[in-house]
Image (cartoon, rainbow, N blue to C red):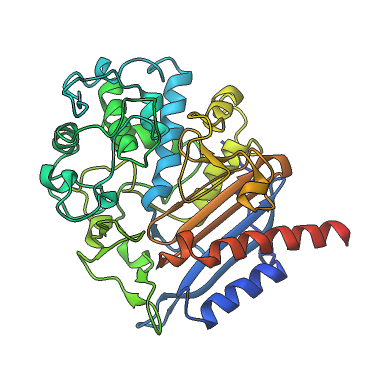
């Protein structure tokens, strides 16, 4: 398929306020390296690779740098689900046991409620994440669950068995909690198609959209940006196996750098993919509608972009609900954002953020190698506000 993203300009355009935010983040040693892309109505308005891909080796960030995507994986796999829904292979509202008959987690009282694919993708199934347990001795740790970013040697289906041993936090559909639901949805795709998840995602998403560098592992690890952890006086290099809590009072994520180049690591649909900023932009633009118009029906995108759990959503993000694969803006005033209602966003634990404002035709991808500044630090809002300031200035010019 042809795409409006196939022919980048020889001299990438730059937005002044965005450059100022990036320069300050690097100068203040909050972000080691970043690739940032901005498109407006399909036109490239900003493209930059700044800072270091590897600070100690003095390796500059490159536009085609590979990143461990973490939760940027979620909208990619969710898009694969929606393609299969549109083709009639799976249903969002059928019981998950139609495909995974042994996946029957129970509530604390022992009852085993029906759970749907829609609930898995919208984080309303009652599942949890190991890294969000209160401490390292939580229920997921006791069950040996992997969050999909560690060096666990288990298979996807063994991980599902362990997830099913953890009591549900609430009856499916009656709450919101960020969870391993997308990993379970990945197993549904395997069962529904009879294909490995990597093949499903390739056939349904990455190949049709030309996302040539995106997959569940890379064979060119030299292109990977080196991850760093926010620290004083400067971010420190992430160590293999290091556990870093994303929020106070949580057990933290166990990171394996080696996983990205390990073809034997199980495919974590919620956090295990590798890719580039350009590939992520291809997906966002396809969903927004300016790229591959025949790739996914508009009704499927509308379902993804509709808050699925009412006003419930991320507790640290007032004004945002959650759709299928990403957060959806309900109330811009409550969220204190220039984005229009109906905008979508999410991030990735290695230091990423992205958003789409369909009403204004804007898509933004910011992949950094610095956790957690690049995911939920001041940099994220500063970059967002700079994008709108630059685009408004351009409209007035």
The picture places residue 395, in percent across and down from the top left corner, at 84, 56
Q: Which quadrant would the N terminus be assigned to in this image?
A: top right
In which quarter of the view is residue 228 placed?
bottom left
Which residue shows up at 61% across the image and 65% down it? Answer: 382
* Observer-nearest of 312 and 299: 312
Which residue shows up at 22% across the image and 27% down it? Answer: 107
Which residue shows up at 11% across the image and 46% down it? Answer: 142
In which quarter of the view is residue 8 placed?
bottom right
The picture places residue 351, in percent across and down from the top left corner, at 43, 62
Would you say 29 lies left or right of 41 here? left
Would you say 299 lies left or right of 91 here? right
Instruction: Note whether 166 is above or below 395 in the view shown.
Output: above
Would you say 96 lies left or right of 43 here? left
The picture places residue 72, in percent across and down from the top left corner, at 43, 48
The picture places residue 117, in percent across and down from the top left corner, at 36, 24
* Observer-nearest of 96 and 365: 96
Q: Is residue 204 visible?
A: no
Instruction: Note whether 97 is above or below 366 in the view shown.
Output: above
* Observer-nearest of 318 and 368: 318
Q: Which quadrant would the C terminus be assigned to in this image?
A: bottom right
């Amino acid at each position: 398929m042809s795409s409006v993203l196939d022919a980048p300009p020889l001299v990438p355009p730059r937005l002044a306020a965005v450059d100022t935010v990036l320069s300050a983040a690097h100068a203040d040693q909050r972000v080691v390296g970043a690739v940032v892309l901005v498109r407006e109505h399909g036109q490239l308005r900003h493209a930059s690779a700044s800072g270091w891909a590897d600070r100690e080796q003095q390796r500059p960030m490159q536009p085609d740098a590979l990143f461990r995507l973490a939760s940027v994986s979620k909208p990619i796999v969710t898009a694969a689900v929606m393609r299969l829904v549109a083709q009639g292979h799976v249903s969002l509202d059928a019981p998950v046991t139609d495909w995974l008959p042994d996946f029957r987690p129970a509530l604390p009282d022992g009852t085993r409620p029906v759970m749907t694919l829609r609930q898995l993708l919208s984080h309303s199934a009652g599942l949890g994440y190991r890294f969000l347990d209160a401490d390292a001795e939580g229920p997921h740790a006791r069950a040996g669950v992997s969050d999909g970013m560690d060096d666990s040697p288990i298979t996807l289906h063994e991980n599902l068995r362990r997830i099913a041993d953890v009591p549900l936090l609430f009856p499916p559909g009656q709450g919101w909690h960020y969870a391993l639901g997308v990993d379970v949805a990945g197993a549904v795709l395997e069962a529904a198609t009879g294909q490995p998840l990597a093949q499903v995602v390739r056939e349904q998403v990455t190949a049709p959209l030309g996302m040539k560098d995106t997959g569940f592992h890379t064979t060119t690890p030299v292109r990977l940006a080196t991850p760093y952890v926010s620290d004083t006086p400067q971010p420190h290099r992430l160590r293999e196996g290091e556990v870093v809590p994303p929020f106070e009072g949580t057990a933290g994520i166990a990171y394996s750098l080696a996983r990205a180049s390990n073809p034997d690591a199980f495919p974590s649909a919620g956090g295990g993919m590798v890719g580039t900023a350009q590939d992520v932009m291809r997906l966002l633009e396809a969903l927004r509608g300016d790229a591959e118009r025949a790739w996914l029906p508009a009704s499927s995108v509308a379902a993804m972009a509709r808050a699925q759990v009412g006003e419930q959503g991320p507790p640290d993000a007032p004004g945002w609900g959650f759709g299928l694969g990403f957060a959806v803006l309900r109330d811009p005033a409550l969220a204190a954002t220039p984005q229009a209602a109906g905008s979508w966003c999410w991030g990735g634990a290695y230091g990423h953020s992205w958003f789409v404002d369909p009403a204004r035709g804007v898509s933004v991808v910011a992949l950094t190698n610095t956790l957690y500044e690049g995911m939920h630090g001041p940099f994220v809002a500063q970059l967002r506000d700079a994008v709108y300031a630059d685009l408004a200035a351009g409209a007035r010019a």
